[in-house]
Amino acid sequence: MLDKAFKGSPKYWAWIITLLCLIGIGFGCYLMQLNEGLGITGLSRDVSWGLYIAQLTFLVGIAASAVTVVLPYYLHNNKSFGPITIFGEFLAIAAVLMCLLFVIVDLGKPARLFNVVFHPTPNSILFWDMVVLNGYLLLNLIIGWNVLEAERGGVKPAPWVKTLIYISIPWAISIHTVTAFLYAGLPGRGYWLTALMGARFLASAFASGPALLILLIFIIRKYSRDDVGKEGVQKLAVIMTYALAISLFFIGLEFFTAFYSQVPGHMESLMYLFGGLDGYHGLVPFMWAFAVLAVLALVLLLNPATRNQESTLKLACGATFLAMFLEKGLGLVIAGFIPNPMGVVSEYFPTVPEVLITVGIWALGFLVLTVLYKLAVGVKEEVEF
Amino acid sequence: MRINRRKFLKAGGAATLVMGVLPVAQALAEKRQSGEAADVKWGLAVDLRACWEHQQAGCRECMDACHYEHNVPVGQGSKEEIKWIWSAPFKEVFPELEGVWEEDLANSAALALCNHCDNPPCVRVCPTKATFQTKTGITVMDYHRCIGCRYCMAGCPYGARSFNFRDPRPFIDKANPSYPTREKGVVEKCNLCAERLADGLKPLCVDVCPHGVLYFGNLKDPQSEISRVLKDRFSLQRKAELGTRPKVYYLL
């Protein structure tokens, strides 16, 4: 099946080469980081996790969101999701792969990575995150491959694949819940210490994931003969609308608890994010961009006329994805460290090599995604013609 | 001598009994040993006002001695600074008490170090057991196992952990050959001089304090210096409401 990835138009190859260049640049920067240490990043003793771990958090959500197509198709037998399910599963594979890479580039001693396996420590949430992320990757690889093989052969997937698919549904929920537990169980980090974290993560995931998937499906439509499920996209947009609304509601709940209770540890991070704290406001423009984009997306999605029209739906998806990226892939992780445990604000800005490493991993994720989608579209075209 | 069946069974039975009892006895003996260790729980107390007054006069003995003894690098800039024991304004060491104290006390210098929590979040979150608690209640690290994930730094509510963002060795002026240096990419922090305690010595900060404002001892022994001073005087623990149960106390 892999041969399909090697046959493409000049445009396809230009895209692949662009991604390879970005991966190369990122890898070069990573070698520099290996050599000099994490000192080349913007991280500090106060903000000790930054862009890398924020990407992990955001991308676990993208991976988990495959459940928004898998669940209606396999559990509710909703046929309109059929044509797009494989794209959701392949998106999950690429996203989990990026997650694992973001963990590795964040380590100070990557050569000792396997200490997590050699000295398993069940009381550490990071240990469980490793277990569930790798398990999810394996599940989706096996499921995706077998479903596609079956489609190619014009048969139904084997019954044991169905069993794995059912397992993958709660597993998807688990990866994002466990990732939320990384944060939600730490004493003294008021912004993260909220029981709502897991629910918030899932809600934002089910908004940002479908947003990306819909945009990807539009791209697939443009470049292939395959007219991928119009109906499925519409239903996915409805799921996304609910998820975005719930997600924003949850953020509102955090504001209420923090500012009505007036507990400083719970207010300060939010103050830093949206208004600035002690004269520092590095993230304020980004968070207001989040707010504007989120409201714009919600208005476009709630209105059936704009939700059903392709051009405005694209705009809404772009706005949702970007908004959630800013909220979760930037603000959530960084602001948890601000102010520091001594009540002092020390800001974090990623450095150029740090951003290039991040872009390199995204490029690698998109490379994997492109190849997988190429296979999926190729098989679909082969079956149709 | 002739062994009949009766004698053979008797001897065999006795041997089985001994072999069966021996491991149990050994386990019991070990338990008694660890029971002895559990009778020790090290704690440290800082006389806040006295220490502040001497710091105003320029005293930095404990910090300098500790950082030399443990090869703590200096001069890496505040963002990447490695700190085992350091001085910070009172209002930063006790941020939750801000505003309650008069201005001079709020800005007075207080010592900060790892609290060697009885219920340490850093140990709970470490994915490799590189950070662990000893039987005497000290939180220590295995620098050779640490993968540098910095989860412990997120977990510590006291900012007591530092990460080697780059190779620390060029930043060590005069190396102490009797304690290891670290590599880039691992976390480190105060170990309450576990290496000295093993030799029956007190932590270096307590030993070198020229004014006797640091108290150290076994919290489980009511006659120890620290137990008595904690009984006599009112003391604070940093962020006691978090349930970490710090074993570093601040005397008022």
Image: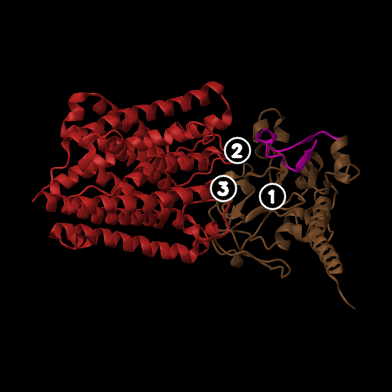
Residue interval drawn in magenta: B233-252
Q: Relative to A312, is A20 above or below?
A: below
At 56% from the left edge and 24% from the top edge, which residue is drawn? Answer: A262
Determine the colour of chain B.
Answer: brown
Which of pointers 3 and 2 lies earlier in the amino acid sequence?
3
Taking depth in this image into account, of A181 and A350 the one nearest to the observer is: A181
- Amino acid carrying label 2: it is Pro
- Residue A309: image location, x then y, percent: 16, 31
Do marks 1 and 3 share a chain? no
* Residue A351 shows up from this direction: no
Taking depth in this image into account, of A212 and B45 the one nearest to the observer is: A212
Task: State the residue position of label 1.
Answer: B86
Do marks 1 and 2 share a chain? no
In the image: residue B204, left or right of residue A235: right
- Amino acid carrying label 3: it is Ser
Regarding mark 3 in the picture, which secondary structure is present there? loop
Which disc, if any, is residue A124? 3
Task: State the residue position of label 2.
Answer: A187
Do marks 3 and 2 share a chain? yes
- Amino acid carrying label 1: it is Trp
